[in-house]
Image: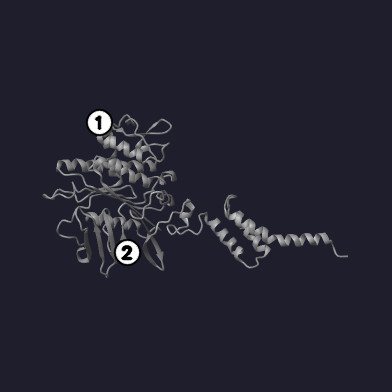
Amino acid sequence: MLETIHLKNVGPATEMQMNLAPRLNLITGDNGLGKSFLLDVAWWTLTRTWAREPVIPKAGARAEIAYQYTKKTKPSYAFKSSYEAARVRWTVKQSRPPIPGLILYAQVDGGFSVWDPMRNYWTEDASDRPNAFLFTPEQVWKGSEFCKGLLDDWALWQAGNDQSFQVLKQVIESLSPSPKERLVPGDLRKLSVRDPQRYPTLRMPYGEDVAVIHASAGMRRVIALAYLLTWAWQEHVESAKLRAERPTREIIFLVDEIEGHLHPQWQRRIVPALLKVMDVLTGTHGSKVQLVAATHSPLVLASVEPSFNADEDAWFDLDFERKNVILRKRPFVRHGEIGNWLVSEAFDLKEPRSLEGEQAIAEAQAVLEASDPSATAIERADQGLRQAGLPDIDPFWVQWGYFKERSTAPRKIAVKRAAEKGPKS
């Protein structure tokens, strides 16, 4: 498992330290602060390859990437890499490093990267050995020289009703949006007279089999994840048999924007589902899984509240303060309602409301805190709250209604007494 990453003079901050937990690691932060960057670096530290373009540090300062991960025997493997500007590369240990396990990386654009110790770490001549399997979004679906792709593999597995298809069905079902809306493969289906392809389908709750190429963006994201997880693990197991070795007991899964394209109902299930789906994949192999995921979703954070364990899990947050990016490992506090996560350190919103509602409440709050607000100020704030579309069930109305009644009561009494006295003679 990946244990630590220490960055110096590379990336958005002068220095970053990340001490990862062995099971679940969530990364939050505003756009552009380095969530995807951290995942890219994590992939490189484990595989010595770049899933996308190499990270190039700022010119002038000495840049370093230090990292540590577990291996079969103790102690853990550690290395400090320096950037060689003259050769435009990061240094690596010339001898072969220990094997970190099976490494999977799901990018936000639908691309997918796999590093398999049985296929990317041979001891014999490595002249024809790929450094890693890097699939573009199109290759995930249509294949490459290393993989037939989702459409062909799924159809072949299903037509043969082999073990891979049985695993794929279980993985897809485990990643379903809800128990009432289970993802189930339908029958293979021809879509046009000229096209000989039989396309995989999903059986919808309303009974129709819809081709996966016509599925929603959320469903396509999930079934692509399901397929690549199944493909990577099945290929790993079969390669291990050929090499007369045991499958790895460690899997590290990196996911960028884990909630991408998913309905809120799905966002509440995706992290627990991915942790459980590894049990479906590995079966009796007893492999340990480490998940490192970047997210913008308060629903994702709320979804792990029941199972979050500080001994196994961690939450990292990126903030921009005084023109500096800071990475913090924050204590995980259970906030309960989703709106409470929006105003937490993870998202830093002042109010879990619309911008207009936030501004109206801020103005009303200023009136609440004034020592002797005028009737005009109270009325203006009241109108602002109503014009902002604050719903009748908003809890702020309770506080505001009590304040308004208390503030206007003396004026009402004075007006009433004046009316009872009548005009002066």
Q: Is tag 1's residue or tag 2's residue first in the polypeptide sequence? A: 2
Q: Is residue 70 above or below residue 177?
A: below
User: What amino acid type should be assigned to the residue bearing mark 1?
Assistant: Gly
The residue at which mark 2 appears reads as 16
- Disc 2 is placed on an element classified as strand
Q: Residue furthest bottom?
A: 60
> At 19% from the left edge and 40% from the top edge, which residue is drawn?
238
List x then y, in percent, for residue 192.
33, 31
> At 67% from the left edge and 60% from the top edge, which residue is drawn?
406
Task: Judge by depth and name the residue closer to the eye, 400 or 334.
Answer: 334
- Disc 1 is placed on an element classified as helix
Task: Judge by depth and name the residue closer to the eye, 189 or 358.
Answer: 358
Is disc 1 surrounded by few (<14), some (14 to 19) or many (20+) residues within 10 Å? few
Q: Nearer the viewer, mark 1 or mark 2?
A: 2
The residue at which mark 1 appears reads as 160
Q: Is residue 205 above or below residue 67?
A: above
Question: Alpha-carbon distance for marks 1 and 2?
Answer: 50 Å
Q: Quadrant of residue 61?
A: bottom left
User: What amino acid type should be assigned to the residue bearing mark 2?
Assistant: Met
